[in-house]
Amino acid sequence: MNLESNDKSEGPVTKAIEKQTAKVPSDTFFVVSNCFNGLCPQD
């Protein structure tokens, strides 16, 4: 499935969010999502 060939165009807010999140390492999203699910490592 090609996501680039959508009939809908992305708005400026969506593009800005994607541009900023592309700079963050994917491990960060993994750790944050685990913390929200109560799996955050405790010291």
Image (cartoon, rainbow, N blue to C red):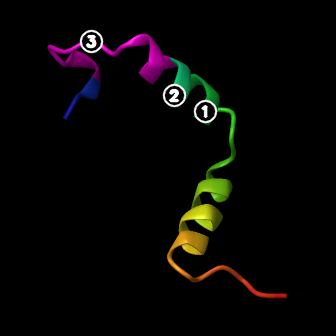
How far across and down, in percent of the image, does residue 2 sit? 23, 28
Task: Please tell me which of labels 3 and 2 falls first in the chain.
Answer: 3
Q: Which residues are magenta?
A: 4-15
How far across and down, in percent of the image, does residue 20 sit? 63, 28
Q: Which residue is pictured at 68% across the width and 41% down the height?
A: 24
Q: Please say if 25 is above or below 2.
A: below
Task: Please tell me which of labels 3 and 1 falls first in the chain.
Answer: 3
Q: Which residue has dot 2 on it?
A: 18
Q: Which residue is pictured at 33% across the width and 16% down the height?
A: 10
Q: Identify the amino acid type marked 1.
A: Ala
Q: Secondary structure at mark 2?
A: helix
**Spatial separation of the CA atoms under disc 3 and disc 2:** 14 Å
Q: Is residue 43 left or right of residue 4?
A: right
Q: Which residue is pictured at 14% across the width and 14% down the height?
A: 7
Does 32 lie within the magenta span? no
| Mark identifier at residue 22 | 1
Looking at the rendered image, the quarter that the N terminus falls into is top left
Q: Identify the amino acid type marked 3.
A: Ser
